[in-house]
Image (cartoon, grey):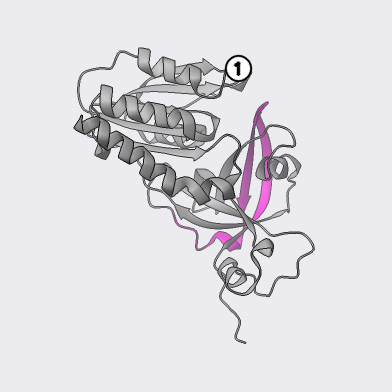
Amino acid sequence: MADKPRDHHRGVVLRTERLSPHMIRIVVGGDGLRDFACRGLTDHYVKLVFPHEGVDYPEPFSVKHVRETMPREFWPRLRTYTVRAWDPDALELTLDFVHHGDKGLAGPWAAAARPGDVVLMLGPGGGYAPDPEAGWHLMVGDESALPAIAASLEALPDNALAHVLMEVDGPEDEQKLGTAADARITWVYRGARPVGQALVEAVRALEFPEGDVQAFVHGEAGFVKELRRHLRLERGIPMDRLSISGYWRIGADDEAWRAVKNDWNREVEADEARALAS
């Protein structure tokens, strides 16, 4: 059988940094990223590839080929992470990982990563960048959306107005966010409350400026659903001015969430359509 072409990028860990108690930065590089290309979006993402240990995969390794030829239980696990920064000249890709101890797959990997470790990834994908013509920008998210929001703030022109609401566990998880824009940044502390509850209240209480708004709202699916309904029905933001998605869902790993996400989106859209028609 002829060799199947590789369908992934191969990076090597260059350095790591603990940004906060729950956020780890990994910078990867190497010649395996020469074909990596971003398109100017600020929510670019990659899917990290985690092959199962002890499984003899065909070479050259290909996710597509493995899925075509091997049982599902041997398929590599994929985890989606936002591109925090990409330097095409230095071939350096920066990824930030939320880390909550031993929970999950990618977080513990990032905590243990050392220079020289190999990283396989698919992508990048993406679909959002701040519109410089927008009257103002609304950016809302939990820790999983922090890399995209930070990249978006850096892309804003100096005449832009942005209201940013970021939910984290507590003040120790705040990060310095650089921007040339007039950015009103509010850190919302979760404490012992459910993820997103305090964030929904903060968005509802926000006094919206006049003018056309472009909104970016991402994070845990439950609060994203609440905020989508609020922004569409109560604030009247049209869908073409709204980038909104559940990056993850409480109680589901990445595979389980991807398996139901399309159905979940259709249910949300149907519910919204009924509300708009009533």
* Left or right of residue 278: residue 271: right
Check disc 1 and report its element: helix, strand or loop.
loop
Question: Residue at the spot x=53%, y=62% of the render?
Answer: 34
* Rendered location of residue 258, percent (x, y): 51, 49
Asked whether residue 36 is drawn in magenta, I would say: yes
Q: Quadrant of the C terminus?
A: top left
Residue situated furthest bottom in the rendering: 1
Q: Which residue is mark 1?
A: 170
Question: Residue at the spot x=67%, y=34% of the render?
Answer: 99
* Rendered location of residue 236, percent (x, y): 23, 26
Q: Amino acid at mark 1?
A: Gly
* Rendered location of residue 203, percent (x, y): 38, 18
In which quarter of the view is residue 121 placed?
bottom right
Q: Identify which residue, 217 or 177, lies in the foreground.
A: 217
* Left or right of residue 12: residue 167: left
Q: Considering only vertical position in the picture, is 208 above or below 46?
A: above
Q: Considering only vertical position in the picture, is 6 above or below 31?
A: below
Q: Considering only vertical position in the picture, is 53 above or below 239?
A: below
In which quarter of the view is residue 109 placed?
top right
Q: What are the residue bounds of the magenta stretch?
A: 11-37
Question: Residue at the spot x=73%, y=33% of the render?
Answer: 101
* Left or right of residue 275: residue 144: right
Q: Quadrant of the N terminus?
A: bottom right
> Is the magenta region chiefly helix, strand or loop?
strand
* Left or right of residue 228: residue 112: right
Evaluate whether residue 242 shows in this view.
Answer: yes
* Rendered location of residue 43, percent (x, y): 43, 42
How many numbered marks does the figure carry? 1
Q: Identify which residue, 76 or 208, lies in the foreground.
A: 76
